[in-house]
Image (cartoon, rainbow, N blue to C red):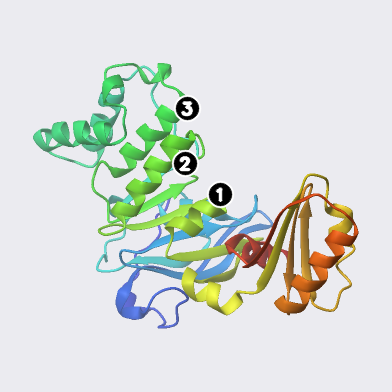
């Protein structure tokens, strides 16, 4: 299988969507993957800045995992280039740590044996590898299970071991596909805090369906739909550019019929409702707040929450993939 060719950044166009040219660490240009007649990834361009954390978002089938697999050298692009700053060698995999959504292990190995094995594949010296293995097992909270066979690990423990494997060689770029999908709330919080600390010295790209995690952790977002990037940029800038007034209502009964009835109001631009919650995007907060409060009171709906806020990453995501 061929590997993505590392293209010197000086030879690439200066346009980019996420990072100033002087801060670029990863750049993909016209990246495309075709399976038969299906274009899984359709000529995407993006950059990620050094020391930044970027979230790759999109519905199932958008092309996220295919994109990550091409970046890591697990799939050869049909066309396009991938380049890492200061790395001109063809095989860029040695600079990348990768954890798939469902890590696969040799179940007959112990956790310590597996990490040692992974480190030897990166030609780490034995003395360094022993200390690095124990360091990561402790960091991931599975040191006490280091001598147990992986086949007896829980799903969360395997997820933590997969994370440790991705970090064993101290990669410059960490690529994670749904990194906290199998973790309980405590484990998820611990891993997110670890990623937050790692941002200071490691460039991170991760895919996720949990938009709250992306909003809480990432500096940049890339939103994919049907193989294309439909929106990308620094999260703060996207918030400012796309922020809209929003009224969130919760009740003890279903609000769907009431919410649907607000669609025709002149100040309403979007309605999202699900069961006992409704989120109504408006263009005039004062008029909307006064009318909706009065309408809810006149209908005697048992409201438990009425909040005037602004649209979130989730609202922006929904607009981008529905456009």
State whether residue 139 is above or below residue 142: below
Residue in the foreground of this view, choosing between 66 and 6: 66
Dividing the image into 4 quarters, which one contains the C terminus? Answer: bottom right
Q: Are marks 1 and 2 in contact (CB under 8 Å)?
A: yes
Q: On the rendered structure, is 51 left or right of 294?
A: left
Farthest residue to the left: give it.
Answer: 127
Name the front one of labels 1 and 3: 1
Mark 1 burial class by Cα count in 10 Å: few <14, some 14-19, many 20+ = few
N-terminal-most mark, 1 or 3: 3
Residue 268: image quadrant is bottom right
Residue identifier under label 3: 155
Q: Is residue 99 in view from this perspective?
A: yes
Left or right of 61? Residue 249 is: right
Would you say residue 91 is visible in this rendering?
A: no
Can you give x and y, in whole percent of width and height, for residue 254 in the image?
Answer: 83, 47
Residue at (42% x, 36% y) in the render: 187
- The 10 Å Cα crowd at callout 2, few under 14, some 14 to 19, many 20 or more, is many
Residue on which the image places disc 2: 180
Return the residue nearer the eye: 179 or 22: 179
Q: Residue 279, position in %: x, y? A: 73, 60
What SS does tag 3 mark? helix
| Quarter location, residue 47 | bottom left
Looking at marks 3 and 2 on the same chain, the residue that comes earlier in the sequence is marked by 3
Write the residue at 46% across / 56% down: 216
- Residue depicted at x 35% and y 79%: 21
Residue holding disc 1: 210
Q: Using the rendered view, name the quadrant where residue 143 is placed.
A: top left
Height in image: 120 above or below 20? above
Residue 315, horizontal then vertical, whole percent: 65, 63
């Amino acid at each position: 299988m061929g590997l993505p060719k590392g293209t010197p950044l000086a030879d690439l166009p200066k346009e980019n969507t996420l990072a100033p040219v002087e801060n670029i660490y990863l750049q993909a240009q016209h990246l495309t993957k075709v399976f038969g007649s299906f274009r899984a990834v359709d000529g995407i361009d993006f950059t990620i800045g050094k020391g930044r954390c970027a979230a790759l978002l999109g519905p199932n089938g958008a092309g996220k995992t295919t994109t990550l697999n091409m970046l890591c050298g697990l799939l050869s692009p049909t066309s396009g280039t991938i380049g890492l700053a200061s790395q001109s060698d063809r095989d860029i995999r040695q600079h990348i740590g990768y954890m798939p959504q469902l890590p696969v292990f040799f179940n007959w190995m112990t956790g310590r044996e597996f990490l040692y094995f992974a480190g030897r594949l990166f030609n780490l010296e034995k003395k360094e590898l022993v200390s690095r293995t124990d360091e990561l097992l402790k960091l991931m909270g599975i040191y006490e299970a280091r001598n147990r066979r992986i086949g007896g690990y829980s799903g969360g423990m395997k997820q933590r071991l997969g994370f440790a494997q991705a970090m064993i060689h101290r990669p410059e770029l960490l690529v994670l596909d749904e990194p906290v999908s199998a973790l309980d709330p405590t484990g998820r919080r611990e891993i997110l805090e670890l990623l937050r600390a790692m941002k200071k010295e490691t460039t991170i790209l991760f895919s996720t369906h949990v938009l709250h995690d992306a909003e809480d952790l990432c500096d940049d977002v890339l939103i994919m739909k049907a193989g294309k990037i439909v929106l990308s940029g620094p999260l703060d800038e996207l918030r400012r550019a796309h922020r809209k007034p929003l009224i969130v209502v919760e009740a003890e009964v279903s609000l769907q019929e009431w919410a649907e009835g607000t669609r025709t109001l002149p100040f309403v631009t979007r309605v999202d409702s699900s069961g006992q919650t409704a989120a109504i995007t408006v263009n005039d907060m004062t008029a909307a707040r006064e009318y909706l409060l009065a309408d809810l009171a006149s209908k005697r709906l048992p409201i438990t929450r009425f909040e005037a806020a602004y649209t979130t990453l989730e609202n922006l995501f929904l607009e981008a993939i529905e456009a």
